[in-house]
Amino acid sequence: MLLVDAYNVLHAPGAASLLPDEADAGELASLVAVSRWRRRGPLLVCDGGPRPGGLGPAARTVAEFRYEVERVQILFAGPGRDADSLIETLIDRNTAPARLEVVSSDRRLIRAAKRRRARSISGPAFLRMLEADAAAAARAWRRPSFAQRVPLPPDQVRYWATLLGVAELDVPQEPESPAVTRPVEPRPAEPTAPKVEPDPASATRRSDPADDPLIREALEEWRGSLHVDDLHMERWLADSDTPDPSSRSRSRSPRRPR
């Protein structure tokens, strides 16, 4: 546990360079909250009662004449009472004096701490340790991870704009990212059958009427009356002078010999 004679420390040499002018117990508690003693149950003891608004907006009322600033307890002795008498009483009632540290330059309190075999620290020495701890805490401070992302996501921009009262139109808009189009992969070409050039000789043979067995039989039966040239339809269609090709075909139709 840490017992601090608050006003003794606030008026010690070196306090003016570390604390603002007319600093109160609230400013001292803020320094203790970032020091090596923040987890040692620090208790700042003050004379009389608190000044109105002297502890700052972070102070929280715990009980009558007891307050808390950033988990550091501040205890006032009460109207017309001094802090030295209250600290001496707390030293005598402490059940683990070997783990007790008393911060004061008052000889009365130094003797009381020595009587219970508690450790005592002078006011200037305590201020030097507070200054070193505050500098180390400032060097170790880092912005939270979300604040290191640049630019901030849109939801965080809206949050801070609302918190700070910035109009939405004053918030810079993020550039629109160009639309990403996925490249279309070419489809594999389907195999095509090789182009086969027609054989002129076979085409001639296929178009020859004499290749038909029925026609060959007719030519044999009507030999002398039926010629193979008469069976080519191209010749009949090419004859544009004939008004009725069917009549010409009938005139050329051979008569079957009796």
Image (spheres, rainbow, N blue to C red):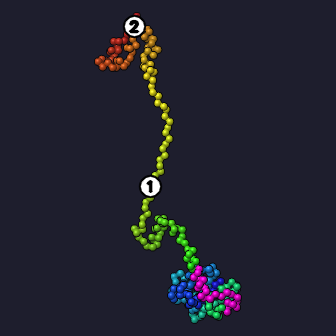
Residue 257 on image: x %, y %: 40, 6
- Spatial CA distance of label 2 from label 1 is 85 Å
Residue 122 in magenta? yes
| Marks 2 and 1 in Cβ contact (< 8 Å) | no
Span colored in magenta:
111-133
Residue 74 colored in magenta in the image = no
Point 59% across, 94% down: residue: 81
As drawn, the residue found furthest toward the bottom would be 80
- For residue 147, say whether it is visible: yes
Please state which of residues 174 and 126 is positioned toward the viewer in this rendering. 126
Question: Residue pushed farthest top?
Answer: 258
Q: Does 204 appear above or below 49? A: above
Q: Position of residue 28 (x, y in %)?
A: 56, 84
- For the residue pair 140 and 191, the one nearer the viewer reads as 140
Q: Earlier in the sequence, mark 2 or mark 1?
A: 1
Circle on res. 44: none
The residue indicated by pointer 2 is 224
Q: Residue at x 65, y 94 (%)?
A: 108
Secondary structure category for the residue under label 1: loop
Q: Amino acid at mark 2?
A: Gly
Amino acid bearing label 1: Ala
Residue 54: percent from the left, percent from the top? 52, 87
Residue drawn where x is 33% and y is 20% of the image: 238
Residue plotted at (57% across, 74% down): 140
**Front position in the image: 110 or 54:** 110
Magenta stretch: dominant SS? Answer: helix
The residue labelled by disc 1 is 179
